[in-house]
Image (spheres, helix red, strand yellow):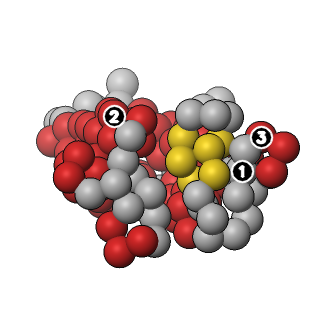
Amino acid sequence: MNNRSMVQTVALAFGAIYLAVAILGLLPFLGGSYTQSINSLLGIFQINLAHNLVHGIIGIAGLVAAGSLARSRMFCQVFGVVLLALGVVGIFLNNPLGLVPIGGVDIGLHLVTGAVLAYFGFAAAAEPRRAAA
């Protein structure tokens, strides 16, 4: 039986997705990059090695966090806020410090992903506990 809460499921799903994107981002035949040169993953998303590493860190953190309700909430809160901030920064700076491209299509993706994670991180924490029947 599945005893995983909704916030744990969200952390697990986003962790798996971000880890998959990190792996796909390293594959040159998909437009990926394993260097700091900016390539276009699937012809849509600008990525480089640093971007792939960040996605990998987020993915692993989500998978690890999914094992605990408290860690899942923390994951969703922290990465929700971080991704929202990256989305806003990406509006003004395409490639801050020349390290990670966060402009273009990534802006909307970061804002939506950040909003979903923040919602589950903060709304789930405010949700009252239900008594077991």
- Label 3 sits on a secondary structure element that is helix
N-terminal label among 2 and 3 = 3
- Residue that appears at 44% across and 57% down: 101
Task: Name which residue type carries label 2.
Answer: Gly
Could you tell me how far apart the alpha carbons at marks 3 and 1 are, in whole angstroms?
5 Å
Q: Mark 3 and mark 2 in contact (Cβ < 8 Å)?
A: no
Residue tagged by mark 1?
32
Q: In this orientation, does residue 102 appear?
A: yes
- Residue that appears at 36% across and 25% down: 133
Q: Mark 1 and mark 3 in contact (Cβ < 8 Å)?
A: yes
Estimate how packed mark 3 is, as few (under 14), some (14 to 19) or many (20 or more) residues with alpha carbons within 10 Å: some
26 horizontally vs 111: left or right: right
106 or 132, which lies in front? Answer: 106
Estimate how packed mark 2 is, as few (under 14), some (14 to 19) or many (20 or more) residues with alpha carbons within 10 Å: some
The quadrant holding residue 34 is: bottom right
Whether 3 is drawn above or below 18: the answer is above
Residue tagged by mark 3?
30
- Label 1 sits on a secondary structure element that is loop
- Label 2 sits on a secondary structure element that is helix
Whether 15 is drawn above or below 65: the answer is above
Residue tagged by mark 2?
108
